[in-house]
Image: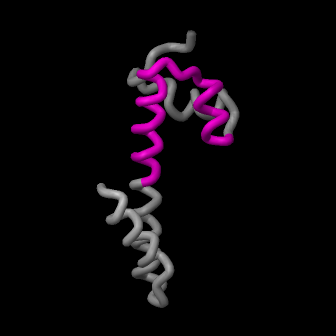
Amino acid sequence: MEADELMSLVKVAGDDDPKRALAATAAARRELERLEAVQVRRARAQGGTWAEIATALGVSKQAVHKKYGGHGLFRSER
């Protein structure tokens, strides 16, 4: 999804129609979760540690490792 499409979803999330706004909010959340996973993979591929990624996300190292570390998609901790 392109950034402009995501921005459109965010705009619709403020719609007066709550059903339309909820659907857009859910779609935006799914896309942001996908983007976060992509960036975590990129950070790990470029040598980023779980601690660095956790700091960037504003969560604990344990939280980010639990969410992304057990999928076999990332290098193990150095």
* The quadrant where residue 45 appears: top left
At which x and y percent is residue 12? Answer: 42, 78
Q: Residue at x 57, y 27 (%)?
A: 65
Instruction: Give the magenta part as a residue range.
Output: 32-58
Q: Residue at x 69, y 33 (%)?
A: 60
For this rendering, which residue is in front, 64 or 38? 38
At which x and y percent is residue 18? Answer: 48, 84
8 lies left or right of 78: left
Q: Quadrant for the N terminus, please.
A: bottom left
List the single residue furthest toward the left: 1
16 lies left or right of 49: left
At which x and y percent is residue 61? Answer: 66, 28
Q: Residue at x 45, y 16 (%)?
A: 75
For this rendering, which residue is in front, 53 or 18? 53
| Residue 35 is a magenta residue | yes
Numbered-mark total: 0
44 lies left or right of 55: left
* The quadrant where residue 17 appears: bottom left
Q: Residue at x 47, y 75 (%)?
A: 13
Q: Main secondary structure of the magenta part?
A: helix
Work out whether 61 lies above or below 35. Answer: above
| Residue 33 is a magenta residue | yes
